[in-house]
Amino acid sequence: MRVRVQPRLQTEAWSLYWKESLRTETQASGAAWGGRRRGHEGAGPTHAACLDAFELDLPEAPSASASASDAGSGPTAAELMAAAAAAAGWPPAGSLTRLPGFAGPWERLLAGGRELPLEAPLRPLAEKGAAATGAEGEVQAAAEGGGGVVTVTLVRVVLKADGWKIRQPGDFLSDSDDEA
């Protein structure tokens, strides 16, 4: 199955004191950074290539964790998120450090303006997309597991610590004698 991924970075300025988001900025493409930075015209790669849309070929075979009833459903949203994060060069969501108070998901997958659950199969999206364009051959190909490019938006949350945190009275206590 062919999937077109539009990556987005949602930067949250996270208050260490209030333990909530102060500000959210979503970067949709390299143009959000203005391409190359001023004064660095000849210097290496920029963020512009970081958020360009790309296409992935996902295997039609179900994963080992899929049940027998899901055998014909193809890849799931969770499998697509893992493959897209790897293709974009992002670290796995499980390895990211959570700031105190942040309980939301690191990644979200959107299709047609709606968030997809992790266990949602992608094949119905391919069939629906091909049917919407009215291409009879693509509908048949999507139903058989091929054809039909699915376009999804992958949103990755990036936390940026902001502000300060009140220290507790015991934070400054020490048992060592070498402090003067």
Image (cartoon, helix red, strand yellow):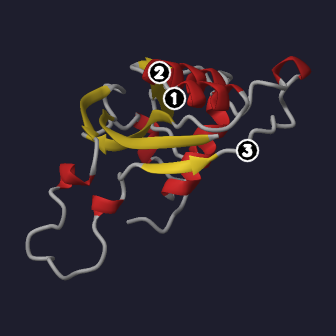
Asked whether the residues under the numbered discs 3 and 1 touch, taking CB atoms below 8 Å apart as contact, a structural biologist would say no
How crowded is the residue under tag 3: few (<14 C-alpha within 10 Å), some, or many (20+)?
few
Locate residue 97, reporting x and y percent: 52, 45
* Mark-to-mark CA distance, 3 and 1: 25 Å
Q: Which amino acid does label 3 sit on?
A: Pro
The residue most toward the bottom is 42
* Mark-to-mark CA distance, 3 and 2: 25 Å
Locate residue 178, reporting x and y percent: 48, 69
Dot 3: element: loop
How crowded is the residue under tag 1: few (<14 C-alpha within 10 Å), some, or many (20+)?
few
Q: In which quarter of the image is residue 128?
A: top right
Q: In this view, does 99 lie above or below 32?
A: above
* Mark-to-mark CA distance, 1 and 2: 35 Å
Dot 1: element: loop
The front one of 32 and 140 is 140
How crowded is the residue under tag 2: few (<14 C-alpha within 10 Å), some, or many (20+)?
few
Q: Which amino acid does label 1 sit on?
A: Pro
Tell me the residue that label 1 is attached to: 105
Dot 2: element: loop
Q: Which amino acid does label 2 sit on?
A: Gly
Tell me the residue that label 2 is attached to: 134
